[in-house]
C-alpha cells in the first residue's frame, strides 16, 4: 500500500510536478534558512554573551531553549488557525519581515533582560513560518512526492545553521556579538517583500482527490478529536519531540563545548561547526526524504523507519565524538549530524498525509509544539541545567556529560515511532475506506 493510496483519488503517480512548484519550494527554503540562521546565530554567541552579560548556563539554556520554544510553540497555534483559513503567503511574508527586525534589534541589547525580550519577539514571529509553509507544500506537491518536498524544505535548517554559526562566529570575532545580530537580521526584510510579491496561493487539497474535505472548517474540539483519534499521528509527533530532545541538545551545545572545553575561538568553531551542520545536514535530510519516498512506494512505514535509522547513526557517533575524539573527532561529529537530520522530513511528511487539507497547518503547529517543547525547550534547558549541576564534580568538562545524558530521549522516541509504524497501515486503510465511502455517497 503506497502513500498515494492513502489519499483517496490522488492523481496518478506519473504526473509531473510543475516547475513553478519547485520555484516556490526553493523560495521557502530561503525563508526557512533565514528562520534558522536568526535562531542559530545565538548558539555561536552563547559564550561571549554569557561573559558579557554575566549569565549562567541555565539562563542561556532558557534563553536559547525553553523560553524561546514555549513562546514559539504557543504563538504557532493561532497563526496556524489563521493559515488554515487565510492567505498563507501573506502570513509567511509578514512573519519573515518581523522576525528579521527583532533579530536586528537583539544587537541593541545591553542586559540579559532586554536580550530576552528581543529573542521573545523573534520566537513569536518565527512561529509564522513552518505551519503555513507545510500547508503550502502539501498543495504544491502530491503525497508521493511530499517526502522529497519536505526534505528539500528542511534543507533550510542546514543552510540556516551553517550561515548562523559561520557568520555569527566571524562577525563576533571582529566586531562583537551585537554586530552579529544586526548583520544576520537585516537581509530578511528584502526576502519578505520578494516572497509576498512572487508566490501565489494554490487551491487547497488539489492533490487529495475530488472528495477531500478541502472546504470543511474544523472547530478546535473537532480538530483535537480527529488528531487524537489518529494514533499514528500522535505517536509520530511524540517520537519527533523525543528525538529532538537528544538531537537539538547535541546541536545547540556542541559549539559551546568546543569553545569552552577545547579552548577554540568562535571563528574556528563557527566555521567548522557551520560546515559540518550544513553539509551533513543536507546529506541526512535530503537522503532520508528522497529515499523514504522511494521505499514508501512499497510500504508507507518507511516514513517512520528512516528516523529509526537516524537514531542508530546518532547515538554511537555522539558517544565516539565526546569520549574518543582524537584525530577523527570531526568525522564523528559529521556522522552524528547526519543522524539528527534524518528524522524531520519523513515525520512531517507522514503527519501531513494523515490529516485533511484544512487541518494541515494546525497539525504542523502541533508537531512543532511538541518538537520545540521537548527539543529546543526541554533538551536545551536540560543540558544547561545538567552542566551547572555537574560542574562541582566535573568542572569545565561537565557540559559533555550533560549533552550525552539527553540520549535517553532518543531511546524513548524509538519506542513511540515503532508504535506509530505499527498503527500506520491500518489508519491509512481506514482513511482510504472513508474516502471511498464519501465518493460512493456523492
Image (cartoon, rainbow, N blue to C red):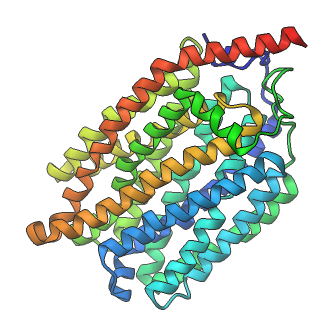
Residue 122 % position (x, y): 60, 70
Reply above or below: 325 against 147.
Answer: below
Q: Which residue does the image show at 27% across and 43% down from the upper left?
A: 408
Q: Work out whether residue 299 can be spotted.
A: yes
Q: Can residue 13 be seen in this view?
A: no
Q: Nearer the viewer, residue 341 or 403?
A: 403
Please state if 101 lies on the left or on the right of 401 as rendered. right
- Residue 263 percent across, percent down from the top left: 22, 72
Q: Residue furthest bottom?
A: 110
Q: Nearer the viewer, residue 143 or 437?
A: 437
Q: Is residue 128 left or right of residue 180?
A: right
The answer to whether 292 is drawn above or below residue 156 in the figure is: above
* Rendering coords of residue 414 (x, y %): 36, 32
Q: Which residue is drawn at the image coordinates 35% and 30% (left, top)?
A: 415
Q: Residue at x 65, y 32 (%)?
A: 226
Q: In which quarter of the image is the N terminus?
A: top right
Amino acid at each position: 500500500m503506497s502513500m498515494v493510496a492513502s489519499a483517496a483519488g490522488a492523481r496518478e503517480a506519473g504526473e509531473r510536478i510543475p516547475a513553478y512548484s519547485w520555484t516556490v519550494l526553493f523560495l521557502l527554503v530561503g525563508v526557512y534558512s533565514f528562520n534558522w540562521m536568526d535562531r542559530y546565530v545565538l548558539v555561536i554567541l552563547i559564550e561571549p554573551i554569557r561573559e558579557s552579560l554575566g549569565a549562567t548556563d541555565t539562563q542561556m539554556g532558557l534563553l536559547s531553549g525553553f523560553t524561546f520554544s514555549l513562546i514559539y510553540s504557543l504563538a504557532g497555534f493561532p497563526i496556524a488557525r489563521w493559515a488554515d483559513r487565510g492567505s498563507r503567503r501573506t502570513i509567511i511574508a509578514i512573519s519573515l519581515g518581523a522576525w528579521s527586525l527583532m533579530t536586528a534589534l537583539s544587537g541593541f541589547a545591553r542586559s540579559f533582560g532586554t536580550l530576552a525580550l528581543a529573542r521573545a519577539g523573534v520566537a513569536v514571529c518565527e512561529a509564522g513560518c513552518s505551519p503555513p509553509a507545510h500547508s503550502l507544500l502539501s498543495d504544491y506537491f502530491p503525497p508521493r512526492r511530499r517526502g522529497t518536498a519536505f526534505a528539500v524544505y528542511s534543507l533550510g535548517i542546514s543552510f540556516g545553521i551553517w550561515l548562523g554559526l559561520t557568520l555569527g562566529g566571524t562577525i563576533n570575532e571582529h566586531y562583537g556579538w551585537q554586530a552579529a545580530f544586526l548583520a544576520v537580521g537585516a537581509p530578511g526584510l528584502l526576502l519578505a517583500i520578494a516572497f509576498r510579491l512572487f508566490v501565489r496561493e494554490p487551491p487547497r487539497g488539489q492533490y487529495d482527490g475530488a472528495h477531500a474535505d478541502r472546504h470543511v472548517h474544523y472547530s478546535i474540539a473537532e480538530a483535537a478529536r480527529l488528531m487524537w483519534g489518529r494514533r499514528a499521528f500522535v505517536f509520530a509527533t511524540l517520537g519527533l519531540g523525543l528525538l529532538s530532545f537528544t538531537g537539538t541538545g547535541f546541536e545547540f551545545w556542541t559549539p559551546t563545548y568546543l569553545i569552552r572545553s577545547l579552548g577554540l575561538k568562535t571563528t574556528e568553531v563557527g566555521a567548522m561547526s557551520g560546515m559540518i551542520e550544513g553539509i551533513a545536514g543536507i546529506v541526512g535530510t535530503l537522503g532520508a526524504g528522497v529515499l523514504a519516498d522511494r521505499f514508501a512506494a512499497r510500504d508507507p512505514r518507511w516514513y517512520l523507519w528512516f528516523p529509526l535509522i537516524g537514531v542508530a547513526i546518532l547515538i554511537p557517533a555522539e558517544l565516539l565524538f565526546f569520549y574518543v575524539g582524537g584525530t577523527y573527532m570531526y568525522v564523528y561529529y559529521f556522522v552524528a549530524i547526519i543522524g539528527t537530520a534524518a528524522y524531520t522530513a519523513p515525520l512531517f511528511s507522514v503527519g501531513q498525509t494523515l490529516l485533511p487539507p484544512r487541518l494541515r497547518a494546525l497539525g504542523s503547529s502541533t508537531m512543532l509544539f511538541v518538537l520545540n517543547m521537548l527539543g529546543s525547550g526541554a533538551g536545551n534547558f536540560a543540558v544547561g541545567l545538567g552542566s551547572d549541576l555537574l560542574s562541582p564534580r566535573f568542572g569545565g568538562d561537565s557540559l559533555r556529560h550533560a549533552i550525552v545524558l539527553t540520549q535517553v530521549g532518543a531511546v524513548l522516541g524509538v519506542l513511540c515511532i515503532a508504535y506509530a509504524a505499527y498503527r500506520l497501515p491500518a489508519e491509512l486503510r481506514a482513511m482510504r475506506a472513508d474516502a471511498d465511502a464519501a465518493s460512493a455517497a456523492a
